[in-house]
Image (cartoon, helix red, strand yellow):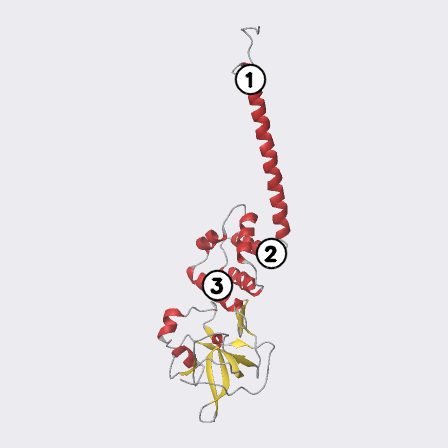
Amino acid sequence: MPDSNHKSIGFIGTGTGSLALMALMAGGGLLLVKKVGDYFAQLKKGQAEKELDTPEGQIALQLKNIFGETPVSDSKYRMVMQQAAMSKADMAKVRELYYLSTGGRRLSDDEQSHIGSGTQLTTTKQTTINKTPGSLIAIIDDRIVWNIGYGDLIRFPPGTKKSIALYANPQQVATGENPIQLKPSAALFRVSKFMEVPYSDLKLRDDWKKFFTPYIRTRKVFAAVQIEFLHPSGKKVLAWSDAREWRTVTPVLKGISGNSYQLL
């Protein structure tokens, strides 16, 4: 018969030996969990370090440096975001790598804390322009860079149902005086001129007051393009419009503009 004074050392026992064994096993379990956790942390860190060599990783590191400065530079932030849009970087991955490289800071929180609302609106506008396939312009280093040359043929955005307003001079693009509406078509239109137009001294048309966000923070300018087309009267007409309304033709074509047009 078992000794009545014997204390079981099984897993379910309640004696001192059992408690010591359970404590020992618990400690071992915690150590194992910690080692497994450390392993996966190192694995994740190693993977993150590899990903920092990607375009998204380099953008994340540039943003980390920018938000590490005091004060944070709006202009540096804009320029990095311009580059990100031009490189077609995956911004979700940029934000993920920013989180990892900063030890858990969210890019959106840093943007909210350090970047003014005006700069954020401008950055959104610049990102839209730079990511638009066939855009006539790009914003790089806070400058308008043209993706067209004189004599190039341009077109309406594919699939658009929106007319483009044409004007006699480039200033009217901003003021909205005496527009002619050009209905969307498959025609190609020749670029006659293109330029930056100052709008600081212009009385902006109502829809620009409401919806226009400057896409250059350092200078009050916008991009206008002059196209050549045939008027229904048979006359060749030159007219100005907002450069953002048009798309390039790929490959770039030069020549005489088409005469397939519709005027409202």
From where the camera sits, is residue 47 visible?
yes
Q: Nearer the viewer, residue 39 or 11?
A: 11
Q: Residue at x 54, y 18 (%)?
A: 19
Q: Is residue 163 left or right of residue 44?
A: left
Amino acid carrying label 2: it is: Gln
Q: Residue at x 50, y 69 (%)?
A: 129
Determine which residue is flagged by label 3.
123
Could you tell which of marks 1 and 3 lies nearer the N-terminus?
1
What is the C-alpha distance between the residues marked 2 and 1?
A: 55 Å
Q: Residue at x 59, y 30 (%)?
A: 31
Q: Nearer the viewer, residue 45 or 146?
A: 45
Instruction: Indicate the position of residue 165 as horizontal and vertical percent values.
Output: 42, 80
Q: Residue 7, relative to residue 159: is it above or below?
A: above
* Label number found at residue 88: none
What is the C-alpha distance between the residues marked 3 and 2?
A: 19 Å
Residue at the bottom extreme of this rendering: 234
What is the C-alpha distance between the residues marked 1 and 3?
A: 65 Å
Tell me which corner region of the image, top left, top right, bottom left or bottom right, holds residue 252: bottom right
Mark 2 Cα shell of 10 Å, populated few (<14), some (14-19), many (≥20):
some
Q: Nearer the viewer, mark 2 or mark 1?
A: 1
* Label number found at residue 58: 2
Instruction: Indicate the position of residue 254 as horizontal and vertical percent values.
Output: 59, 83
- Are the residues tagged 3 and 2 within 8 Å (C-beta)? no
* Label number found at residue 18: 1
Q: Residue 263, relative to residue 143: is it above or below?
A: below
Q: Nearer the viewer, residue 82 or 10?
A: 10
Mark 3 Cα shell of 10 Å, populated few (<14), some (14-19), many (≥20):
many
Amino acid carrying label 3: it is: Thr
